[in-house]
């Protein structure tokens, strides 16, 4: 009986576990490429992002307070400032590339 269990375990390993391991490696490789592209994008706009992240949240919070759209923790203001800051950083990065190169 021990040889039958061992034989079935070997068959399971070769016909089930190895293809799943290969599929898992392909998924990790694909996800790694996507994550790498995201890190490269944010690495390219780092300088511009530093310039906007200092003042943009304060500006948006002040704007929200002036139009009585202030939530308790300013979550909406920070969310808008992150999205708008990323977009503006990318635009200014493109402008810097045109000026420099």
Image (tube, grey):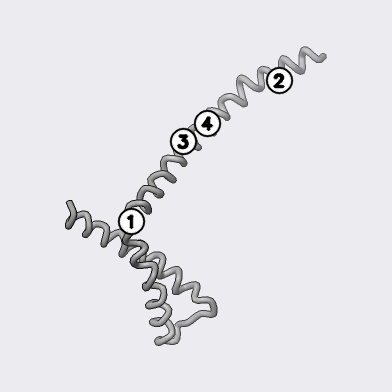
Cα distance in 3D space between marks 2 and 1: 52 Å
Residue 20 locus on image (x, y percent): 57, 29
Mark 4: few, some, or many residues within 10 Å (few <14, many ≥20)?
Answer: few
**Marks 4 and 3: which is nearer the front?**
3
Residue at position x 57%, y 29% in the image: 21
Q: SS of the residue at dot 2?
A: helix
Task: Give the percent coordinates (x, y) of residue 87.
Answer: 33, 62
- The residue under label 1 is 45
**Residue, far right:** 1
Disc 4 from disc 3: Cα separation = 10 Å
Q: Residues within 10 Å of mark 1 (few under 14, many from 20)?
A: some
The tag earlier along the polypeptide, 1 or 3, is: 3
64 on left or right of 3 = left
SS at mark 4 in the image: helix
Location of residue 72 with respect to 33 vertically, above or below: below
- Sequence order check: which comes first, mark 2 or mark 1? 2
Labels 4 and 1 touching (C-beta < 8 A): no
- The CA distance from mark 3 to mark 2 is 28 Å
Q: Nearer the viewer, mark 3 or mark 2?
A: 3
Above or below, 15 relative to 54: above
What residue is pinned by disc 2? 9
Q: Residue 47 at what x, y percent from top left?
A: 33, 59
Mark nearest the camera among 1 and 3 is 1
- Residue 68 is tagged as none
Residue plotted at (66% across, 22% down): 12
Q: Mark 2 Cα within 10 Å, few/some/many (few <14, many 20+)?
A: few
Element under label 3?
helix
Q: Nearer the viewer, residue 28 or 1?
A: 28
- Identify the residue under disc 4: 23
Which residue lies under the disc numbered 3?
29
């Amino acid at each position: 009986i021990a040889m039958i269990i061992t034989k079935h375990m070997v068959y399971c390993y070769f016909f089930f576990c190895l293809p799943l391991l290969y599929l898992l490696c392909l998924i990790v490789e694909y996800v790694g490429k996507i994550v790498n592209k995201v890190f490269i994008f944010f690495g390219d706009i780092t300088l511009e992002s530093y310039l906007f992240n200092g003042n943009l949240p304060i500006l948006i919070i002040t704007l929200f307070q002036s139009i009585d759209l202030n939530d308790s923790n300013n979550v909406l203001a920070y969310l808008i400032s992150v999205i708008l800051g990323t977009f503006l950083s990318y635009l200014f990065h493109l402008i810097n590339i045109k000026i420099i190169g």
